[in-house]
Image (cartoon, rainbow, N blue to C red):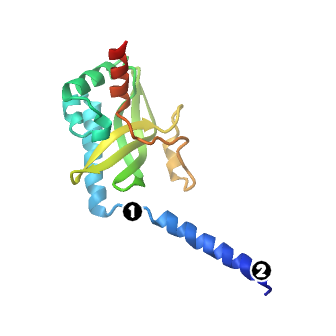
Amino acid sequence: MDLLNRSTIFLFVSLTVGLFTVSQSQPSLDDAQLKALNSRIHEYTEDFRKSDWAKLYDLVSKTGKGDASREVFETAMKRMHGKEYGELQDLLEFKFHHAVATKPGEYDIYGCGKIMKYGWKYDGIVEIHAVQENNDWYFTGWRPTAFPAELCKSLNDSKWKPYTHDNWDKPMEEIRKYEETKKQ
């Protein structure tokens, strides 16, 4: 084997091992963490579905709340999520599929969601951003991964990736929109 072939093989093996190491460096969730996360997601989804904004406030991360008090949060949620004609979509159900670590203690959770907008219900892939704070799970927000909604069965494709990425580094959309209306 000549030097060029050996160098090419060495480079290929090095890159392959390096890529594998990077993809494996994301901390995975153990069974206890997954169980706790799924329990909190269930609470989050139930409170969203029931429009129990007071309870939902207690499940939202510090970043998701921003500077909003409980009263401001509840007012913003009521304005943006009316039962029939709310400006924003409602998350009614969520079935966990997988989690992707984005930063230490932060995960984008993907699954199949039942969503309602203007009284219409539909299923689609949903992303929920989960954060570990005070030894528990809190949520910065959620969104459908695409519009029109992606079919849930797409999650079974090992090559599936969301169309867009959110940094989840600002308060929930409801809070931001409410604050904008106060400035007008």
The N terminus: image quadrant? bottom right
Q: Earlier in the sequence, mark 1 or mark 2?
A: 2
- Distance, label 1 to label 2, CA atoms, is 36 Å
130 and 144: which is toward the camera: 130
The C terminus: image quadrant? top left
Q: Which residue is mark 1?
A: 27
63 and 153: which is toward the camera: 63
Measured along the vertical axis of the image, is residue 19 above or below residue 8?
above
Hey, which quadrant is residue 177 in on the image?
A: top left
Measured along the vertical axis of the image, is residue 59 above or below residue 29?
above
Please state the horizontal and vertical placement of residue 84, each as a whole percent of the image. 35, 18
Are there few (<14), some (14-19), or many (20+) residues within 10 Å of tag 1? some
Measured along the vertical axis of the image, is residue 97 above or below residue 79?
below
Label 1, secondary structure: give it.
Answer: loop
Q: Which residue is mark 2?
A: 5
Please state the horizontal and vertical placement of residue 12, each as a whole percent of the image. 67, 73
Judged left or right of residue 146, residue 87 is left
Which residue sits at x=49%, y=39%? 145
Residue type, mark 2 in image = Asn
Which residue sits at x=57%, y=54%? 159
Label 2, secondary structure: give it.
Answer: helix
Judged left or right of residue 153, residue 32 is left
Residue type, mark 1 in image = Pro
Please state the horizontal and vertical placement of residue 10, each as a whole percent of the image. 67, 78
132 and 121: which is toward the camera: 132
Please state the horizontal and vertical placement of residue 140, each as a whole percent of the image. 34, 40
Are there few (<14), some (14-19), or many (20+) residues within 10 Å of tag 2? few
